[in-house]
Amino acid sequence: MPRKKTPLSWRGLSYLLVLLVLYTFYQLVGEQFREIGGSKGELTGERVPCTVIRVYDGDTFKCRLDNGEEVKVRLIGIDTPESRRNRKAYRDAEKEGKSVEEIVRLGKKASAFTKRLIPPGTVVYLETDVQVHDRYGRLLAYVYLPDGRMLNEVLVREGYATVYTFPPNVKYAERFVELQKRAMKEGKGLWAEGM
């Protein structure tokens, strides 16, 4: 006796659902890999020049791409202390066992250090990783100074930032960890006595 045909079995429905989820994921994630806000040059692993306009704090700044587009950039893989009192400063203080005033003081030092390295007008070079933007719309980048050094690495090596990596952006995570160990051992920046 032949089986009665059903319009759609549970197995078929499951396959369709999986395909729909994969397609939706591809559409959402794929958008992050497309051009930044309509810019002509894509940031796909190559280093793209950007002129610094303003430094907000130790790990965030705004710059202008060659096509005139202004982008807010967040350094990938690192985190500097907050330079002003906010919720994150209070969370960091609790987590680190320090006062909020101490966190803010350290944040201001990290911010001043970054401002010395990339004052307005400096041309830096941006390299992205897998995820191009964060949930706040900031461009996530490894930033190269005019002399070729990576700003992210310099901040960790000098003790002004801690390692703060999240998959999928882990391209240089191991290097950052090694640099942080060295900064801690040498008592630099955040790791200095009485800082």
Image (cartoon, rainbow, N blue to C red):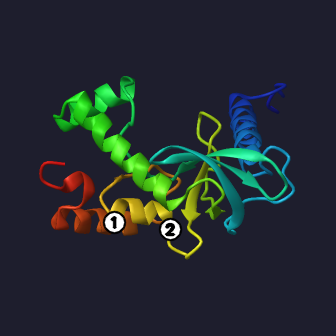
Q: Nearer the viewer, residue 125 or 3?
A: 125
Mark 2 = which residue?
150
Mark 1 Cα-neighbour bin, 10 Å: few <14, some 14–19, many ≥20: many
Q: Is residue 57 visible?
A: yes
Query: Can you say which quadrant of the picture contains the N terminus?
Result: top right
| Left or right placement of residue 143 versus residue 16 in this view | left
Q: In this figure, what is the number of numbered marks?
A: 2
The location of residue 125, given as percent across then percent down, is: 64, 65
Question: 190 and 131: which one is in front?
Answer: 190
Which x, y percent locates residue 72?
A: 64, 43
Query: Mark 1 — residue?
Result: 157
The secondary element bearing badge 2 is classed as loop
Residue 87 sits in quarter: top left
- Left or right: 105 as drawn, with respect to 49: left
Left of 54 or right of it: where is 87?
left
**Residue flagged by tag 1: what amino acid is it?**
Arg
Residue at figure coordinates x 64%, y 44% from the top left:
133
3 to 132, vertically: above or below: above
Residue 190 — which label?
none
Give whichever of 13, 26 is nearer the camera: 26
Q: Is residue 23 above or below residue 99?
A: below
Residue at image position (20%, 55%) is 191
For marks 1 and 2 on the same chain, the one whose residue lies earlier in the sequence: 2
Q: Which residue is pictured at 19% across the width and 30% down the height?
A: 99
- Alpha-carbon span between mark 1 and mark 2: 11 Å
Residue 188, image x and y in percent? 23, 61
In this rendering, the answer to whether 115 lies above or below 126 is above
Q: Amino acid at mark 2?
A: Met
